């Protein structure tokens, strides 16, 4: 048996490596096209091939140890008398009596399906585990995609901007505001400045805004917003406050390679712009305070936020082009980007993540379906004589098929119940891991996801049950009589 498993493992590993290389390259090419990257040709690294071989060969051999050892313990008497099935009478305890009384009111097909469900408890537990993991991954992927979408929407809604203009170097803000305001299609312009800095060893970005601005939408958790009278004041984001243990009223030191400045926290807001595994995000202060920190000319800015007279995307794009042409004619190096372009970039990145999640769902669904398929196939093999008796009593092909379909969908329903708890815990943990790797994410959960999960696992179970159920329906009475 171990030799047979080894042959299967070797064959599967070869097929898996070849398929994995080409599918992996195709997936990488798709992701790179979304992100506008050039990945070059297909490259094979020993650091990837060797682990693939070890996993491909080792996993089946390790998984086979338990079943093979169990098979070795079957006696000659068991093998000849019951095809390895121990003949046990039905349960006589109270639970068995209650179960029989409940089943008595159900259709006969359901009765037969439930009766065989718990005969092989170890097999049932393994099948339930596989389908429960399938449900959990499905739910985690749904919640992950939803949380990423909510985070992206929140980031884009922090600034009420149609066009953003970023200069390579800070310039006199009032002069450029007048230039941009004079362009056709522009209704309002405000300036800001962004400066890289540090708090201790942690990277942050100092953002200087007008204290009374029309573009930044604050979501204060504590404290207040900036005022024109503030000196050495700042509003920090909630992630930074949590990571550094800072509160309203605390002092912190901001520095770069040349400058150091102490600021007092007057407010804490929810703003995950710029938050990455290597950066704590933004520190918000007034433009004058940011200019003073960087030791640049007073009221200088490198970012201009623009609202347009029209909300039509085509008109906004045309206005952005006019702004870019005008500033480039003044020999300024600028980057002009519309909010719609940012949304498209965000949607492309979310689409890439969704594809990765879909592949993960398909993979675990296939594993769960194969587990259920094998479980039902073994159940049919062990119950051929019972099927023959049912056929001799007048059971039709449809009746036999329904018995095994009900058995498969019942296992799927039980796995859904298990996954109600396991899936929620997995989804929450998955969102936390994504938040640690990318940006802090809100846990966005929709109760409808539970019904989607049920429909998904019932669909997987129905597809996996088709083959064994049809095979059971085709068994002839004569085949069961001379089977042994």
Image (cartoon, rainbow, N blue to C red):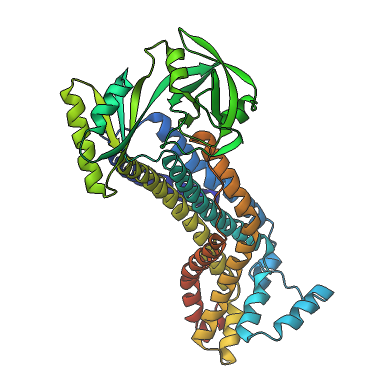
Residue 240 image point, x, y percent? 57, 28
- Asked whether, in this view, residue 254 is left or right of residue 104, the answer is left
Asked whether residue 458 appears in the rendered view, the answer is: yes
Asked whether residue 381 appears in the rendered view, the answer is: no
The image shows a total of numbered marks equal to 0
Of residues 8 and 27, the one nearer the viewer is: 27
Residue 116 image point, x, y percent? 65, 74
Residue 159 image point, x, y percent? 41, 38
- Asked whether, in this view, residue 309 is left or right of residue 145, the answer is left
Quadrant in which residue 187 is drawn: top left
Vertical relation: 386 (above or below) 167: below
Which residue appears farthest toward the left when viewing the image? 329
Q: Residue at x 54, y 34 (%)?
A: 436
Vertical relation: 322 (above or below) 392: above
Q: Residue at x 61, y 62 (%)?
A: 415
In which quadrant is the C terminus drawn? bottom right
- Asked whether, in this view, residue 95 is left or right of residue 407, the answer is right
Quadrant in which residue 155 is drawn: top left
Which residue appears farthest toward the front when viewing the image? 229
Residue 49 image point, x, y percent? 40, 35
Q: Residue at x 54, y 17 (%)?
A: 232
Q: Residue at x 53, y 44 (%)?
A: 59
Of residues 244 and 75, the one nearer the viewer is: 244
Which residue appears farthest toward the bottom when viewing the image? 394
């Amino acid at each position: 048996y171990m030799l047979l498993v080894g042959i299967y493992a070797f064959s599967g590993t070869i097929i898996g490596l070849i398929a994995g290389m080409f599918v992996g390259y195709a997936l990488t090419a798709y992701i790179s096209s979304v992100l506008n990257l050039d990945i070059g040709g297909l490259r094979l690294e020993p650091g990837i091939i060797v682990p693939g071989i070890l996993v491909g060969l080792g996993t089946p051999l390790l998984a086979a140890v338990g079943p093979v050892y169990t098979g070795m313990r079957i006696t000659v008497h068991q093998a000849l008398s019951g095809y390895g099935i121990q003949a046990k009478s039905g349960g006589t305890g109270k639970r068995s009596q209650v179960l029989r009384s409940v089943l008595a009111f159900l259709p006969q097909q359901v009765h037969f399906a439930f009766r065989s469900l718990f005969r092989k408890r170890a097999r049932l537990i393994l099948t339930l585990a596989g389908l429960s993991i399938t449900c959990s991954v499905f739910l985690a992927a749904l919640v992950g995609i939803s949380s990423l979408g909510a985070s992206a929407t929140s980031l884009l809604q922090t600034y009420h901007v149609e066009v953003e203009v970023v200069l390579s170097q800070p310039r006199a803000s009032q002069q450029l505001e007048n230039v941009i305001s004079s362009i056709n299609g522009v209704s309002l312009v405000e300036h800001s400045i962004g400066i890289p800095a540090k708090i201790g060893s942690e990277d942050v970005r100092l953002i200087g805004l007008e204290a009374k601005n029309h573009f930044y939408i604050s979501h204060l958790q504590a404290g207040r917003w900036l005022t024109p009278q503030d000196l050495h004041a700042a509003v920090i984001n909630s992630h930074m406050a949590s990571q550094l243990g800072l509160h309203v009223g605390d002092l912190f030191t901001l520095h770069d390679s040349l400058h150091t400045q102490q600021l007092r926290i007057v407010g804490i807001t929810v703003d995950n712009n710029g938050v990455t595994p290597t950066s704590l995000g933004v520190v918000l202060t007034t433009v004058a305070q940011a200019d003073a920190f960087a030791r640049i000319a007073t009221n200088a800015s490198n970012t201009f936020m623009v609202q347009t007279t029209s909300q039509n995307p085509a008109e906004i794009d045309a206005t952005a082009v006019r702004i870019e042409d005008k500033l480039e004619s003044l020999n300024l190096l600028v980057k002009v980007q519309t909010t719609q372009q940012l949304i498209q970039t965000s949607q492309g990145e979310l689409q890439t993540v969704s594809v990765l999640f879909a592949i993960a769902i398909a993979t675990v669904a296939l594993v769960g379906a194969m587990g259920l398929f094998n479980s039902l196939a073994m159940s049919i093999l062990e119950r051929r004589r019972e099927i023959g008796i049912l056929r001799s009593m007048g059971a039709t092909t449809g009746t036999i098929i329904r018995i095994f379909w009900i058995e498969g969908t019942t296992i799927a329903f039980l796995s859904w119940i298990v996954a109600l708890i396991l899936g929620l815990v997995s989804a929450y943990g998955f969102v936390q891991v994504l938040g640690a790797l990318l940006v802090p994410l809100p846990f966005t959960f929709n109760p409808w996801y539970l019904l989607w999960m049920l429909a998904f696992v019932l669909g997987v179970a129905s597809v996996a049950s088709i083959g064994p159920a049809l095979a059971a329906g085709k068994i002839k009475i004569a085949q069961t009589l001379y089977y042994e």
